[in-house]
Image: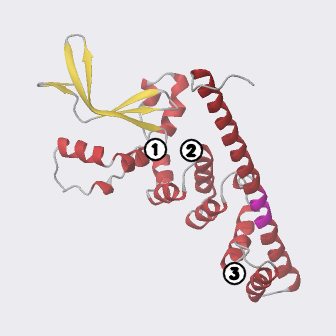
Amino acid sequence: MGKPLSPDNDYINFFTEVKERIRRSQYEALKAVNKELIQLYWDIGRMIVDKQQELGWGKSVVEQLSKDIQEEYPGIQGFSGRNLWNMRFFYSEIQQNKKLQPLVAEISWTKNILILTKCKDPLEREFYMLHVRKFGWTKDVLIHQIENKTYEKYLMNQTNFDQTLPEKYKHQAKLAVKDHYTFDFLELAEEHSEHELEQTLVKNIRKFLIEMGVWFTFVGNQFRLKVGESEYFIDLLLFHRKLKLFIAVASVLSSGTENW
């Protein structure tokens, strides 16, 4: 028998590696299941379209098919009449756009349908699919981004990054920073002080970070910064994990009566 394990650093590191391996396996399994599910729904949508065109079947075939599937497979989920119509719609829309076809298998069915029903422009659809894949947006975050017109604001985004940032950061920064943000969740009065704004943002930090974007991490408020002999306080300090840069959010950075 070996000696009993003690909770030393070697075992903790070993256990962490095992957990990470399990998580990777779970993630890969979920991706594989999602890919197969999307392919199944694509095929059923195509089959419905083909049969309606070939045999002239009307709308009733969808409801009949839903009923028969659920009788054949009691308790099976995902084959309601509404979802079969979604499959038909999904196939009809995606088969027209070869650029979207590789993307749909990489995000969930719910998010695919959400994007297709709420966004009509092919480029807008591609924008949101790419962002869901890249940033892992939840359904609620995706809805928020679409309703906040993130795509339109991205197209209109104008920054001074071309003049102020090194070449290797320009494109990343343009994707990371939006030109307009919606902070309606703060429920502030029409007129409010900078201090009230700061304190309300801190109290609503989770919603604030969702609005700012998934790569932002909250570091602190009234963050002390010393430059030479002068002392400054940043209202809000964020860190962008992808760019690996600190972002100062402030209308005024002050030390006494000094301003930045």
Q: Amino acid at mark 1?
A: Gly
Task: Name which residue lies at 66% across and 31% down.
Answer: 17
Residue 107, percent from left and from top: 66, 54
Per the image, the residue denoted by label 1 is: 213
Q: Is residue 170 magenta?
A: no
Q: How is the image coloured?
A: secondary structure
Label whose residue precedes the other's in the sequence (2 or 3): 3
Q: Which range is magenta? A: 36-42
Q: Secondary structure at mark 2?
A: helix
Residue 55, percent from left and from top: 88, 85
Label whose residue precedes the other's in the sequence (1 or 3): 3
User: Main structural element of the magenta stretch: helix, strand or loop?
Assistant: helix
Mark 1–mark 3 contact, CB under 8 Å? no
Q: Quadrant of residue 47?
A: bottom right
Q: How many neighbours does mark 2 have within 10 angstroms: few (below 14), some (14-19), or many (20 or more)?
A: few
Disc number for residue 135: 2
53 left or right, relative to 89: right
Task: Name which residue lies at 66% across and 78% down.
Answer: 82
Per the image, the residue denoted by label 3 is: 81
Q: Amino acid at mark 3?
A: Gly
